[in-house]
Amino acid sequence: MSKKKRILLKIGSNTLTKETDNISRGKIEDIANQIAKLKDSCEFIIVSSGAIAVAKQFVKLESLQSEVFVKQALASIGQPHLIRIYQEIFREYGLLSSQCLLSYSDFEKDESKTNITNTINVLVNNNYIPIINENDTVATDEIKFGDNDKLAALTASLLDVDLLIIATNTNGIYTKASIKNGTPETIKEVTDFDYLTSEVVNSKSSHGSGGMQSKIEAAKVAKKANIETWIVNGLQDNFILDAFENNINFTKIN
């Protein structure tokens, strides 16, 4: 029996909401459908944003505290709902899932890293798909800067995955000149990070908070662990399958 390809899929809030103000069940169904089709050859670990976006659908918090604390509270409200939506939809496609909440500090302690690795390996080996999110209630930096890109890269490195796929709302990374011209052109393959950094136009999306720069930083972390990164347009249906078949434009960083 050949070894399955281990993929870490990072899904941003803009992908999950399809750039609206509501979580798209259709997009999660699209992801589940693709994973189900690939389950004989690939095993998936998911890092998913979206807890705050879920909470904003049905609650408005008033507070005298700073905006960061309100976002942390929203994440606490939204996370159980986000996981419930994943579990309901994945179950319809015959997929099992579990929740893991991690903090960046977990990656600074050897014991924690060992525990994370062992736990997730047990889950994956028993056909469970771990759905990982930042533990937002204790992680102000992620809410302000990271949007789970760094967490995805650190997790990918720790778990020795074969491929990191970052699903976003563009067809990969565009050249700076093409953006200025209004005709975005995808950089299809990258081996020189200095070139890539010089081409990045760092604009942040409506729901996410990382921007393209954080995805480049994530790819750098993955590269140190010899992991290839793909930046793919997750708004498109079948984006994983189409990327494998090279039927769409996306950026490969190796």
Image (cartoon, rainbow, N blue to C red):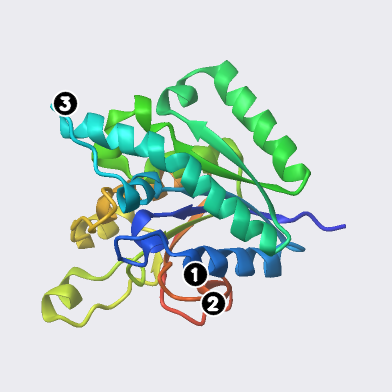
The amino acid pointed to by label 1 is: Gly
Which quarter of the picture shows residue 252?
Answer: bottom left
Identify the residue at horizontal 40%, vertical 59% (top origin): 23
Residue 26: numbered disc: 1
Identify the residue at horizontal 74%, vertical 63% (top origin): 41
Q: Nearer the viewer, residue 21 or 219?
A: 21
Residue 242: numbered disc: 2
Seen from this angle, which residue lies furthest right? 1
- State the CA–CA distance, disc 2 to disc 3: 45 Å
> What residue is disc 3 on?
65
Task: Say which of marks 2 and 1 sits in front.
Answer: 1
Answer left or right for 61 relative to 105: left
- Estimate the x, y position of residue 243 in percent, counting from the top left: 52, 73
> Element at badge 2?
helix
- Mark 3: give few (<14), some (14-19) or many (20+) Cα within 10 Å: few
- State the CA–CA distance, disc 3 to disc 1: 35 Å
Mark yes or no: residue 231 visible.
yes
> Element at badge 1?
helix
Identify the residue at horizontal 64%, vertical 63% (top origin): 35
